[in-house]
Image: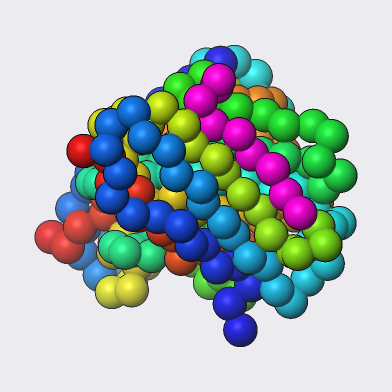
Amino acid sequence: EVPLLESGGGLVQSGGSLRLSCTASGFTFSSYAMSWVRQAPGKGLEWVSSISHTDDRTYYADAVKGRFTISRDNSKNTLYLQMNTLRDEDTAVYYCAKPRGGALRPPDYWGQGTLVAVS
Amino acid sequence: DIQMTQSPSSLSASVGDRITITCQASQDIRKYLIWYQQRPGKPPKLLITDASTLEVGVPSRFSGGGSGTDFTFTINSLQAEDYATYYCQQHDSFPLTFGGGTKVEMK
């Protein structure tokens, strides 16, 4: 069973928008904060955004602040990342990750990732 | 923002070798340091939390240490399946930040 499954990636033009989804299973989604982490091709890991389990607190990397919006629907066990005004440097594999508790806690589950390519 | 400086960026080692990777934080992060292993095309795997706590199921040849700003990650007796890239990450405060990674290659 795959606890986290990302979808929504693809090829998009610079300046365009995309919405990523991460569907969770096998744990009580509404009890945990969630995060997005990305990895550009051949590069290291970069934290993007996190959200509290109740949706009332969100956190963003400076590189995406004002362009990306993290949200969640606990009734659907789904995490989202709305990405607007995409730039070439946003090209990456985007992983969703489940921290072990609050948003600062270490993530014990990761999805397999979805590729976003901006051209 | 807290900068994480990881070194070396790559190293070559043989099976059975002992290797050590260091990670330095730009400010005090107490014990809030994570080590991951990542193989090509796969998500990161959590190995060590709180600088030195080994995750369940992770072999004891892996170890971590340090606190404050200076941390180490060691593999005693490197095995074939350990050739991968390793990352440190601080989780003391937002924004969460990663080290640049260390690629461990076969000598």
Q: Quarter-wise, where is residue A76 in the image?
A: bottom right
Q: Is residue A68 magenta?
A: yes
**Magenta residues, dominant SS class:** strand
Q: Is residue A90 visible?
A: yes
Number of on-image labels: 0
In the image shown, does B67 or A113 lie closer to the viewer? A113
Q: Position of residue A61 (x, y in %)?
A: 54, 26
Q: Is residue B42 magenta?
A: no
- Range shown magenta: A65-73
Q: Quadrant of the N terminus of chain A?
A: bottom right
Q: Position of residue A100 (x, y in %)?
A: 75, 54
Q: Quarter-wise, where is residue A57 in the image?
A: top right
The residue located at (55%, 40%) in the rendering is: A82
Q: Position of residue B28 (x, y in %)?
A: 65, 19
Q: Position of residue B74 (x, y in %)?
A: 45, 52
Q: Quadrant of the C terminus of chain A?
A: top left
Left or right: where does residue B28 sit relative to residue B24?
A: right
In the image shown, does A38 or B34 lie closer to the viewer? A38
Question: B20 above or below B6?
Answer: below
The residue located at (76%, 54%) in the rendering is: A73
Left or right: where does residue A110 sit relative to residue B85?
A: right
The residue located at (81%, 41%) in the rendering is: A55
Q: Quarter-wise, where is residue A59 in the image?
A: top right
Question: B46 above or below B102?
Answer: below
In the image shown, does B4 or A102 lie closer to the viewer? A102
Q: Is residue B24 visible?
A: no
